[in-house]
Image (cartoon, grey):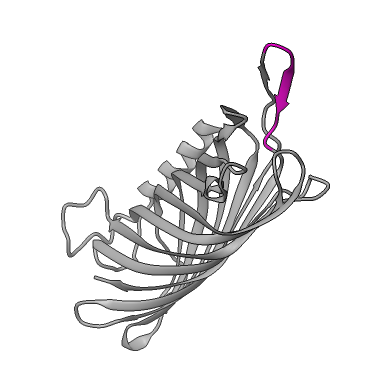
């Protein structure tokens, strides 16, 4: 599978290209989203909801194998680096460790995410329509501060390593306007769930099966030296049951599994490019 993906990327990069854009592009964004996390396989599924706020930065370089910043029309390759930080206070509707129903609010959550992707640009028409397929490697680290609830809570940390495979479809218009659509599949390569402070022990579960989906539409206006854009988006994660972990004390053996879960984000990015 990895050899096939590398071969596809090589074919994308070596083919000739005609699209014209700046060789170096930077974007800084403010983001906000409606956040929801649920474990639907449990009889009474716990549910986190709230509003996230954050910032992101992205660099895109064109013509990786061209030395000229003005003319790289024969080199369709591009490379993107993206970093994101989101945080917010969420409300919890679930139960305590002993099974007692419980609700809590103002739980501090945050996540950090980064990805590197590479691909190529294809001019589909003569009037500015281009396709940008890509693949790469990404990582996401989420911290859920259930320990904010006091002795009944614990700290949850989720770490995903994933393979992003996606595309951008971009239409350039006159007077610096453009409209882009993005679609992306995130293939989970490795996941680790850390539950810290449950019954005075830390539990680590491996999560090996799952995927993510993303989509967005971006409207952008370019001026002489900078541009501005708005971009509504959706992000979704579906993670299967983790591997079982057994922990024993002097009398009993306990089994711990991180249950199947779903994360949804609906939001908006507003940013500047230069």
Q: Is residue 235 above or below residue 143?
A: below
Residue 121 in the image: state x and y as whole percent: 40, 60
* Residue sticking out furthest to the right: 43
Most extreme residue toward the front is 151
Q: Residue at x 27, y 64 (%)?
A: 25
Image quadrant holding the C terminus, namely: bottom left
* Residue 96 placement: quadrant: top right
Taking the image as shown, residue 131 lies to the left or right of residue 150, namely: left
Snapshot quadrant of residue 63: bottom left
Examine the rendered structure and indicate whether residue 129 appears above or below residue 44: below
Is residue 233 among the parts visible in the rendering? Answer: no
Front position in the image: 227 or 40: 40
In this rendering, the answer to whether 95 lies above or below 5 is: below
Q: Residue at x 46, y 37 (%)?
A: 6
| Image quarter in which the N terminus is found | top right
Q: Of 225 and 42, which appears nearest the observer?
A: 42
Viewer-proximal residue, 120 or 51? Answer: 51
Q: Which residues are magenta?
A: 250-258
**Residue 274 drawn in magenta:** no
- Whether residue 256 appears in magenta in the rendering, the answer is yes
């Amino acid at each position: 599978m990895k050899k096939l993906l590398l071969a596809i990327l090589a074919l994308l990069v070596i083919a000739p290209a005609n699209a014209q854009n700046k060789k170096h592009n930077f974007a800084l964004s403010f983001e906000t989203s409606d956040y929801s996390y649920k474990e639907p396989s449990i009889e009474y599924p716990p549910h986190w909801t709230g509003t996230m706020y954050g910032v992101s930065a992205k660099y895109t370089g064109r013509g990786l194998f061209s030395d000229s910043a003005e003319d790289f029309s024969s080199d369709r390759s591009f490379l993107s680096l993206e970093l994101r930080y989101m945080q917010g206070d969420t409300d919890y509707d679930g139960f305590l460790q002993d099974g007692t129903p419980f609700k809590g609010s103002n739980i501090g959550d945050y996540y950090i995410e980064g990805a590197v992707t590479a691909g190529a640009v294809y001019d589909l028409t003569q009037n500015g329509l281009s396709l940008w397929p890509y693949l790469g490697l990404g990582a996401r680290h989420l911290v859920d501060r259930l320990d904010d609830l006091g002795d009944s809570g614990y700290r949850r940390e989720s770490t995903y390593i994933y393979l992003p495979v996606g595309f951008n479809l971009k239409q350039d218009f006159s007077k610096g306007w453009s409209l882009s659509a993005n679609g992306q599949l995130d293939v989970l390569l490795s996941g680790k769930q850390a539950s810290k402070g449950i019954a005075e022990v830390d539990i680590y579960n491996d999560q090996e099966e799952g995927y993510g989906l993303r989509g967005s539409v971006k409207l952008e206006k370019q001026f002489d030296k900078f541009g501005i854009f708005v971009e509504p988006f959706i992000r979704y994660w579906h993670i299967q049951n983790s591997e079982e972990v057994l922990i024993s004390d002097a009398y009993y053996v306990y089994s711990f599994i991180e249950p199947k879960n779903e994360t949804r984000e609906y939001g908006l990015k507003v940013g500047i490019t230069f």
